[in-house]
Image (spheres, rainbow, N blue to C red):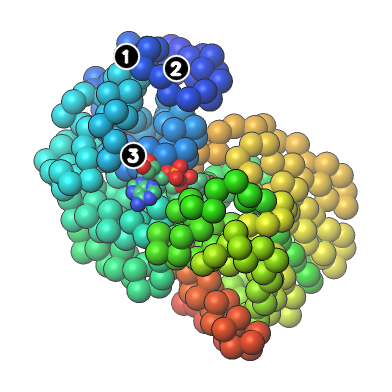
């Protein structure tokens, strides 16, 4: 009873805040803090940028199986603002230098790495060595080698690892996976997926700095399109060929602007993706033996929308991040399936590397092979 009341209270407060920027003068102290239900896992967010601020932290006020227990930040001013807003005890606030001391903190069960891509491996590995379960944001790392190092560290330290692929917990995406699994429209014959947005205001941002991002549109948005063609077919691809397009080289100085890629699948399905930092697009479309299905948008936060040759899809809209973090917590607490294992993040990085290789070789086809389908197309 007490739990239900607290959750309702938190939800009301979040709605009231309306996703506005964090300010110190509206503490949620009475609702949150160290006296959490012991059954809930304590999550520490590492990196308090826009995704943590506007999506993850608000979602953690409404999760059933985990809560915001700690923060790791390089900005002393954020320590005060977040500490006050979310009633985080001083002992659960870390910076990048003293982060490793988190190993002695019993209130932190999970470390969620929400930093620029170049920092994912370092903090995921340090978290695993501290004995904490890890959620690592997408793209998993800068390259396959780093993915392997993260997987190894988590395995050696006996902690769970999940990637921040929120869509696997989301009902429209789950419905697509059901269509494929149950062959609702027969076999898929052609799948296409687009994921991109127009970037125009800040060429200095870390996403356009190869040292921090590892690559441009493909690393940032392309992984969504890659994921779409895989769960939209239920298969890993067996080859990829790719092309790069550049129309604004003065803005995209060191990272890819637009990439297209074509996939072959063992069953004969043909797949294609487009990813861009220059074109707004967010869509998954599959042509099947007896009809079609589509999500558009397919990977924004809220709301997704979908339709099929039989009609509109209509699912309850909920925070995808809330569903995702609760699914990971259920994996840790109750041994529920891990919907987004580290191996899935590594598979996608293998595909990313093959796409970049194909482009560097003038579009030459690259063979792909994977050990697992990760529980039905990821
Ligand atoms: P952001 O730029 O808003 O925040 C980045 C954070 O990292 C900031 O707090 C910044 O202070 C900190 N930081 C530390 N060292 C830095 C450095 N050298 N340069 C820049 N920032 C530095 O980014 P974001 O949108 O919060 O993205 C963070 C991660 O989350 C990325 O890996 C991104 O791909 C991922 N992300 C995932 C989703 C999703 O839907 N799963 C959505 C957005 C972002």
Q: To which residue does mark 3 refer?
A: 45
Q: Residue at x 59, y 32 (%)?
A: 318
Q: Residue at x 49, y 52 (%)?
A: 204
Mark 2–mark 3 distance (CA, rounded to whole Å): 19 Å
Please tell me which residue lies in front, 356 or 86: 356
Q: To which residue does mark 2 refer?
A: 10
Q: Nearer the viewer, mark 1 or mark 2?
A: 1
Residue 13 x, y percent position in the rendering: 48, 14
Please tell me which residue lies in front, 228 or 377: 228
Q: To which residue does mark 1 refer?
A: 29
Marks 1 & 2, CB-CB < 8 Å contact: no
Label 1 packing within 10 angstroms: few (<14), some (14-19), many (20+): few
Left or right: residue 185 compared with residue 193: right
**Secondary element at image label 3:** strand
Identify the image quadrant of the N terminus: top left
Label 3 packing within 10 angstroms: few (<14), some (14-19), many (20+): many
Q: Which disc, if any, is residue 79?
A: none
**Secondary element at image label 2:** helix
Instruction: Please tell me which of labels 2 and 3 falls first in the chain.
Output: 2
């Amino acid at each position: 009873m007490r739990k239900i009341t607290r959750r309702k209270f938190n939800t009301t407060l979040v709605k009231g805040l309306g996703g506005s920027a964090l300010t110190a003068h509206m503490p949620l102290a009475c609702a949150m803090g160290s006296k959490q239900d012991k059954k809930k896992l304590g999550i520490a967010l590492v990196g308090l940028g826009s995704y943590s601020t506007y999506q993850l932290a608000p979602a953690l006020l409404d999760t059933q199986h985990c809560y915001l227990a700690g923060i790791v930040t390089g900005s002393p001013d954020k320590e005060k603002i977040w500490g006050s807003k979310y009633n985080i005890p001083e002992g659960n606030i870390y910076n990048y230098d003293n982060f490793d001391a988190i190993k002695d903190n019993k209130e932190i069960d999970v470390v969620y790495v929400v930093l620029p891509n170049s920092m994912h491996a370092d903090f995921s590995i340090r978290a695993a060595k501290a004995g904490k379960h890890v959620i690592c944001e997408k793209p998993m790392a800068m390259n396959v080698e780093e993915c392997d190092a993260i997987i190894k560290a988590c395995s050696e330290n006996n902690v769970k690892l999940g990637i921040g692929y929120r869509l696997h917990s989301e009902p429209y995406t789950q419905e697509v996976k059901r269509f494929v699994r149950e062959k609702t429209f027969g076999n898929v014959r052609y799948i296409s997926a687009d994921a991109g947005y127009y970037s125009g205001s800040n060429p200095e941002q870390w996403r356009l700095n190869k040292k921090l991002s590892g690559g441009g549109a493909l690393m940032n948005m392309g992984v969504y399109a890659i994921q779409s063609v895989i769960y939209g077919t239920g298969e890993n691809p067996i080859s990829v060929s790719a092309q790069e397009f550049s129309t604004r080289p003065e803005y995209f100085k060191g990272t890819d602007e637009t990439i297209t890629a074509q996939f072959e699948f063992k069953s004969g399905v043909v797949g294609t993706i487009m990813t861009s930092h220059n074109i707004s697009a967010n869509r998954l479309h599959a042509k099947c033996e007896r009809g079609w299905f589509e999500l558009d948008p397919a990977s924004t936060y809220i709301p997704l929308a979908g339709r099929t040759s039989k009609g509109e899809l209509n699912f309850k809209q909920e925070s995808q991040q809330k569903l995702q973090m609760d699914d990971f917590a259920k994996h840790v607490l109750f041994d529920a399936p891990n919907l987004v294992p580290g191996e899935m993040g590594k598979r996608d990085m293998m595909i990313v590397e093959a796409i970049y290789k194909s482009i560097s070789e003038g579009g030459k086809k690259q063979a792909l092979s994977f050990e697992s389908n990760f529980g039905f197309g990821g």
